[in-house]
Amino acid sequence: MKIKFAFTLIELLVVIAIIGTLSALFLPNFMGARERARDTQRKSDLKQIQKSFELYKQDQNPPAFPASLPTKDICWSSLAGCTGNIYMNRFPSDPSPNKQYYYNVDNNTLTYTLCACIENSADPDTTNSCGVCGSCSSGKCFEVTQP
């Protein structure tokens, strides 16, 4: 006599229910990971821009910062064609489409502020006063000023 081993319908339904419950618990955490990754990229970009602005200021006589942000995704250098002193090989842009980095400069006092809107409202490095950024949808922004 042959014995057949198979799963019953109840066993299959229980396993499907367990898998569905686990995916419902963990899926929101994975969605938030994308936001946190974009926020980390924004912070890193602003810090790199800050360093390149300091290099730019040292090359100017008298010292000054750029009047506006350089063109995104293009080499930023002291001479055309990416020659001379290269400040950034590729000027970064916000990782989200239709978003941008904000910049405010005062060359009289040699001060500037760089700002980006942050998606994760629980980020500890953010501020609620987004003066340069304007109004961010999350209400949080990350600002970098001259060192």
Image (spheres, rainbow, N blue to C red):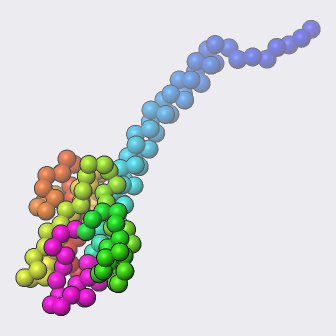
Place residue 18 in its image quadrant. top right
Residue 75 lies left or right of residue 3; in this view the side is: left
Residue drawn 13% across and 62% down? 132
Is residue 6 inside the magenta stretch?
no
Res 88 visible: no
Q: Is residue 92 above or below residue 33?
A: below
Residue furthest to the front in view is 81
Place residue 115 in its image quadrant. bottom left
Say which of 111 and 56 sits in front: 56
Residue drawn 92% across and 8% down? 1
Residue drawn 16% across and 59% down? 133
Place residue 57 in its image quadrant. bottom left
Quadrant of the snapshot with the C terminus: bottom left
Res 14 visible: yes
Residue 141 lies left or right of residue 106; in this view the side is: right
Residue 145 lies left or right of residue 9; in this view the side is: left
Is residue 64 inside the magenta stretch?
yes
Locate residue 40, reporting x and y percent: 36, 60
Q: Is residue 38 above or below residue 78?
A: above
Count of picture labels = 0
Q: Is residue 61 above or below residue 143?
A: below
Residue furthest to the right in view is 1
Residue drawn 38% across and 46% down? 32
Say which of 70 and 98 sits in front: 70
Q: Which residues are magenta?
A: 51-69
Say which of 37 and 13 sits in front: 37
Residue furthest to the bottom in view is 61
Residue furthest to the top in view is 1
Locate residue 123, reporting x and y percent: 29, 57
Locate residue 69, reporting x and y percent: 22, 68
Locate residue 122, reporting x and y percent: 28, 53
